[in-house]
Amino acid sequence: MSRLEILKTYKIYIGGAFPRTESGRYYKLLNKKNEVIANVCLSSRKDVRNATVAARSAFNGWSTRAPFNRGQILYRMAEMMEGRKSQFIDELMLQGSSKQQAEREVQLSIDRCVYYSGWCDKYTALFSSVNPVASQHFNFSVPEATGVVSIIASEDTSLLGLVSAILPVIAGGNTCVVLASESKPLCAITFAEVIATSDMPGGVVNIVTGNSNELHSHFSTHMDVNAVIYCRENKSEQKAIAENASLNVKRSFFWQYDWTKDEAQNPYLIVDLQEIKTTWHPIEHIDISGAKY
């Protein structure tokens, strides 16, 4: 007897859990032969709000975690992805990639996790400074995490563009809310399953699926979002995001990279999402008699 194939419903990832979209809506994802390959959640404004609340709740714990431990967790993500390579490759091929393209994208994504895991406890030393001042003080400047970052990931890549935008954000102690590719969403939710099993605290990364035309304004107007990253080429959405970001002086970034190139991974992407904190400390002098001044 023939049987009906049970298609996976790719749910969203918020606060370490996999709820269905609050809206109850979903869309059928088609392959090149117009065959339905998955049911995907069509997220709403409420989902974005829930994800932002989760990201804000997780921020203090993640930003104050020891940097070497953040690096351990990112490396664990690479280990988990390595163990699920075949699943990622299969999903990329379902969405139209050749086997060679799929294998390369997965390998680059795993390597990118390893790359940023190594930077977690090093970028602060590279970008901090001791500043010369005229008064009797030590003056230090160090980078600190910005806060909650919303990311509208590349539409053209299912996995590599997504992880390349997320990793520099979380390596620097930020938390994030991410909109995955609408046409190629499968690997984004599988990557969320990797995050959920890799010691990453719930709420650090939150991933929703849906339509950018509907959701981009919510990503850029939410008052508890501190920065927004846009990785697509829609000029009208770029303009709207830049204008919306000014409402509470968010930083806005428009990352347009060939994600397969080395230039798409560098520590300056971490520093984009950092605030510089400067501390003054008086210099204490002790004279020959033991008096302090």
Image (cartoon, grey):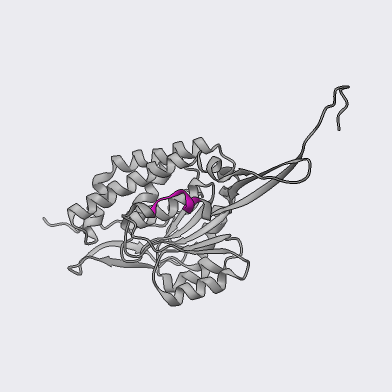
Whether 235 is among the magenta residues is: no
The quadrant where residue 25 appears: bottom left
Whether 269 is among the magenta residues is: yes
Indicate the position of residue 159 as horizontal and vertical percent values. 33, 55
Indicate the position of residue 175 as horizontal and vertical percent values. 52, 51
Nearer to us in this view, 121 or 71: 121
Nearer to us in this view, 258 or 15: 258
Q: Residue furthest bottom?
A: 236
Task: Give the overall secondary structure of the magenta segment.
Answer: helix
Left or right, 168 with reference to 279: left
Rendered residue at 54%/50% (across/down): 174
Does residue 149 appear anywhere in the picture?
A: yes
Left or right, 9 with reference to 116: left
Nearer to us in this view, 122 or 16: 122
Q: Is residue 64 above or below residue 37?
A: above
Rendered residue at 55%/46% (across/down): 127
Left or right, 182 with reference to 275: left
Indicate the position of residue 30 as horizontal and vertical percent values. 25, 67
Query: Magenta region: which residues?
Result: 264-270
Indicate the position of residue 89 as horizontal and vertical percent values. 24, 51
Rendered residue at 52%/51% (across/down): 271
Q: Is residue 112 above or below residue 157?
A: above
Left or right, 75 with reference to 108: right
The C terminus: image quadrant:
top right
Q: Is residue 281 above or below residue 152?
A: above
Q: Residue furthest left?
A: 1
